[in-house]
Image (cartoon, rainbow, N blue to C red):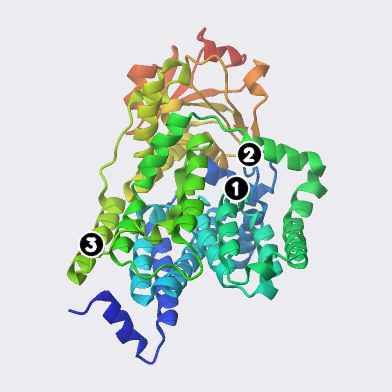
Amino acid sequence: MKSITSLSEAIHKRTFPLQKLIWVFAALFAIAVYFLLHERTLNAHDPANYYLAIKYGFSVAAERPHAPGYPLFVLVWSWLVAAFNCDPHAAILILNGIFLFLSIGLCYNFVRRFWGSGTAIVATLLVACNPVVLYYSSVAEIYIYDLFFSLGAMYLFMSCRRKLLPLAFVLLGVAMGFRFSSVILLAPVLAVVLWSRVDKREILSLRSIGLSILGLLLGIAVWIFPFYIRTGGIESVQQALRSAANLDSTVYQNAAVYLSYLLWSVNIGVVIFLLRRKPIAAIKQKWLLVSWFVIPTMFFIFQHYAKGYILLILPSMIIPMAYTIDAVKRKSLKRAMTAIVLGADLSLFFFMPFVVPPVESNLPKAQRSSLERVETAFLRSLSFFAPSYSHIRVADAAITEANVAITTYCAPQSIIIVDNSAGAWAFPRSLQASHPSLAFVQGNPNDTTIVSLFSGSEVDRRYSTAKVLSADTLYYLIDPRYAAEFGTPPEAALLVSGSRISLYRITEKVKLPFWKYFTKIK
């Protein structure tokens, strides 16, 4: 049996070049992921934000989407809706498929340039079959863009000719309209790449620097004027930046979530270590690795939980992790390790046991110790955020169950209180997207404040202090498994009880802290 390297060399001798075959594989793979794996419902808060932005228009103030707004995503999604005459949810998933297709092709070309076609084939398969990649290609989130941007930016700044570098900075400025944070987090590694180029002296000339800065500003102007300045002035930009920087999590929680996500990615580095080739020409591997992997990691731990952001630095695993250690030479071991990792990744995605977090994970932070918060953050990252097929299907089932119950029993113009236990699956924002005539509030009967009111296409946070809400009819949605822990309100009539959702109709105002907001109940 030939080794992977020998196989790639044999393919090169055929009439069709391997580069074209990779793009064909990328297209077929992305299409298969879209039709076989994608989520059927809006399974989280952010996808509902994106859906509402496409349907009702861009608005950071109304969290369509949430800050900083990702304006160019909204624009491209709207184009796809018009081009394919499809549902906004489908447009988000289609764009994810396009990013997956481009990421696979870029991954092969990036690795092939520095390590050869044999290693490139293995690296491409490892990236394509990674559970995090499969998951975020299948749900209506935007994290799969980070994989495309990370590979694309690296390849562009390594490969483009010096005369075209200002154009590369134009594209970098445009990229900030998709994900501002992605550009900031990769800025250190892009600086290392430019500093390590053989034409560094010409790149650092005053003329080249001036043109590059101008190109960056032109790219930013593409989205900042039509989406922010023209609609809300400079205050709109400031609001977006303030809201994006307002993060509420601890270092320990961030580290717990990040480490669990890192487990899904590090196996790529293990395999590529076994296939290690000569160092990248003109670039010191250790500085490339430090700037690409370590610096964003510090941000995730000290500032923000990782979640799908891990895709931004997943390609750095392609760099041999132990560049000072001799590679294992036995080809049979290379093949065995590759097969084991690919099989494990696919098995984890399709068959991973679903880890149910403890009930305490839905309690307010004040009611949990620091250690309990770290523990629940880690367990939540293995369940609510787990990159598995089981997560997608369980969320689909919960949202579908909630939508059926609401459609069947809830009157228009009423308010539905979504308990934290039910809200872990049936996000109020997701329900709002399907039921614009209803209002949704998420909270716990023992809480003293209401977090938000979701109604129509809006999210209104003023109700957290207004202390006055009224509705023709009031309903209560709870996960029946947690009813014993959180309790149901007195004088509540059970309308339907499913495996994950129980729906009650509130028939009388009660004296628990949470219910003081509701002054009109029929």
Residue on which the image places disc 3: 337
CB contact under 8 Å: marks 1 and 2: yes
**Residue 303 pos. (x, y %):** 54, 36
Closer to the eye: label 3 or 2 = 3
Q: CA distance from mark 1 to mark 2?
A: 9 Å
Can residue 155 be seen here? The reply is yes
The residue nearer to you, when weighing 384 against 41, is: 384
Q: Identify the residue under disc 1.
A: 181
For the point 35% across and 90% down, the residue is 14
Horizontal side, residue 169 vs residue 366: left or right = right
Q: Are marks 3 and 1 in contact (CB under 8 Å)?
A: no
Q: Is residue 220 above or below residue 461?
A: below
> In the picture, which quadrant includes the C terminus?
top right
Q: Residues within 10 Å of mark 3 (few under 14, many from 20)?
A: some
Instruction: Depth check: give the residue in front, 405 or 373.
Output: 373
Crowd around label 1: few <14 · some 14–19 · many ≥20 (10 Å)? some
> Residue 244 got which mark?
2
The three-letter amino acid code for the residue at tag 2 is Ala
**Residue depicted at 56% across the width and 68% down the height:** 158
Q: What type is the residue that disc 1 sits on?
A: Ser
Q: Secondary structure at mark 2?
A: helix
Residue 362's tag is none
Q: Position of residue 218 (x, y in %)?
A: 76, 61
Q: In this rendering, is residue 417 above or below 172? A: above
Instruction: State the quadrant of the N terminus.
Output: bottom left
Of badges 1 and 2, nearer the viewer stands 1
Badge 3 or badge 1: first in the primary sequence: 1
In the rendered structure, which amino acid carries the disc numbered 3?
Answer: Met
Residue 5 vertical position relative to residue 328 in the rendered view, above or below = below
Q: Look at the numbered disc 1 and give the secondary structure of its residue.
A: helix
Residue 252, given in percent of the width and then of the height, sits at: 43, 30
x, y percent for residue 452: 60, 27
